[in-house]
Amino acid sequence: MNEIEEVKSRLDIAEVVGQHVQLQKAGRSLKGLCPFHTEKTPSFIVTPDRQTWHCFGACGTGGDVISFVMKKEGLDFIEALKLLADRAGVKLPERTRTQENKHKYERLYAANEAAVSWFRQLLTDADAASGARAYLERRGIDSSTGEAFKLGYSQDSWDGLRDHLRDKGFSNEELIAAGLIIEGEKSPYDRFRGRLMFPIQDPKGHIVGFGARALDDSTPKYLNTPQTAIFDKGSLLYGFDRAQPAIRLEAQAVIVEGYMDVIAAHQHGFDNVIASMGTALTERQVRILKRSAPRVVLALDADAAGTEAAVRGHDVIRDSAETSENVVPVMNWRGLVTYQSSVSIELNVAVLPEGKDPDDVIRGDVDEWRRLVEGAQPVLDFRLDTAANAQNLDSPSERSALVREFLPLLTAVTDPIVRAHYLQRLGTRARVSERDLGSMLRRSRTSGPDNREQERSPGAIRRGDPKEEFLLALLLRYPQIHDEGVDVTSELLWESENRQILEIWKDSEDQEGLNDALPMELQPHLERLLDRRLPSYDTKEAIAALYDCVAKLEARQTKADKRSSEALLSAIEETLGPAAMSADGDSNPDDEQTREFESALNRDMETGLKLHARERSDPQTRIETGANG
């Protein structure tokens, strides 16, 4: 949950609006006099179930709690968010996306690029780099691969890089901020000395840091750039910038541990191989992968460290799935978009031969590497086998421990056939009936503290709106439908953050322009939109999907309008009495309240006709707007 969602989840819109509007019950909604224009008969509706508001009078607009505060207080999105965050007790990140910081980041990128050029020149020409060249030759890395990965050498000097980059116009402060030099007692000195250099690039191709391998007995064996404004090891995957096209083409990423493993794989044609920077997978790395790879293979050593890495990677992916909406759009048989739950990433484990790393396997026998990857074991099979092998299954207590360790992993499995398969396998290992295991699993789903079926607090909202987010993800992913997207009215989107992104997107020429114009508070939400999995469309299909989604959002709005107008009419009737409904009643046609009632009645009829027309023209809409909502 990002900060915007946390703010909204901690606040109840009825309570916030109630500070400005006297609200009364009107069915499942609340009604009151609109605070944005003068009226005597209420036309302002708050719907707690959806955490939305709408004015059916002169304003004709609505939204969520943030948009209400924006309109009432005359604030922009960020100002309203900050006001509500203070009220909710949510700390927002400090804003750093200024033009000054943009220039700072560009200087850090430039410093690293200059360092790459220097290191490359040394590796190619310097006598001192003969050991580095010999090492690459022993590892079978040819010159073209070394150039493709921009491999280099840092001379064994305390000030060589520092002095070279200062001559290029970089200050000590910039080089320290880039992690290239270290502040010393007397003067700054080079961080990397006498090492083989592996430049590390972000997904956009910027050089953000380095990995450096010692060529002697120096420690540590590998030295990385420290955390900087542009280098965060937990957010990077080595080789990902080069591997993206192959990962998308093959719909699979293979993750190894080391730089040399990645380089050897690419040299031998396995271009979808990346490395996790020597750490277990992080949630941020998973978010990057989800955009390109529905399937991930972890190629791990056959030891305890490899097993631990697989378990931790699986846990991170499960946690990432549980904290996201996991809703993907699919085309049904009528060509319409529907939404289904989906596991975020399919994880498989390839266990390497004992004593070998991926580099050894690939250089020794590429066919063996291919077989290992293709035969990778589903992570649940790997975890069941690993857990079972760690127990003495002749012991009842250790069989019980096996069940306690593995059974909770099945709570995230929604496919009944897959779940039954693993219950059967677990039952065989633990000598327990599938029925008993199934009962235990159901109890764990309904009684645990993290149970998602538990009732939400009054002010809570679900995370994201799948239709709104699908629409935005579609526009972000398919720039060729920009002209069609510009015609989408932001009023169709009920979530303020979605409205803001749509409006900024309309004014942006490209993705870079959107990133520059978007407030940093909306960056996590943009990342989630970019993470959403979409079908592969051509331009015509993307336009059709956009129009279909817009139609669904319009139908949602019409349905909500109808329910609210009915509640509003009912409330007005209670105020004016039965005479207002009678043609021969005593009501004064010039009375303002009567005129407002007639206006509300006309709007209700118009909404009803609009809804009826939608249902007649689209059977699917009729199903979606029927009694089951």
Image (tube, rainbow, N blue to C red):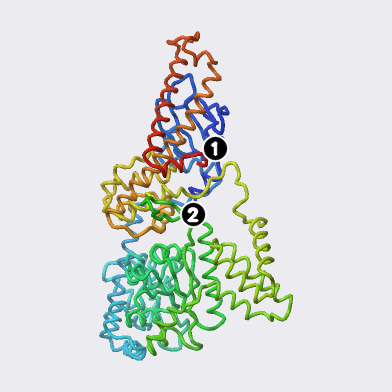
List x then y, in percent, for residue 215. 40, 87
Quick one: 222 or 486, which is closer to the camera? 486
Quick one: 543 or 54, which is closer to the camera? 543
List x then y, in percent, for residue 333. 39, 54
Amino acid on which the number 2 mark rests in the picture: Glu
List x then y, in percent, for residue 95. 42, 51
Quick one: 142 or 519, which is closer to the camera? 142
Determine whether, in the image, residue 390 is placed left or right of residue 557: right
State which tag comes first along the sequence, 2 or 1: 1
Position of 597 relative to 507 (above/below): above
Residue position for label 1: 48
Are dots 2 and 1 in contact, CB under 8 Å?
no
Residue 206: quadrant of the picture: bottom left
For label 1, count other residues whose C-alpha is less than 10 Å away and answer few (under 14), some (14-19) or many (20+).
Answer: some
For label 2, count other residues whose C-alpha is less than 10 Å away and answer few (under 14), some (14-19) or many (20+).
Answer: some
Position of 454 relative to 628 (above/below): below
Report the residue at 40% width, 43% height from top: 552
Amino acid on which the number 1 mark rests in the picture: Pro
Residue 55: quadrant of the picture: top left
Report the residue at 42% width, 45% height from top: 497
List x then y, in percent, for residue 537. 32, 58
Determine whether, in the image, residue 76 is placed left or right of residue 626: left
Circle 1: element type: loop
Circle 2: element type: loop
Residue position for label 2: 325
Quick one: 188 or 190, which is closer to the camera? 190
Determine whether, in the image, residue 190 is placed left or right of residue 68: left
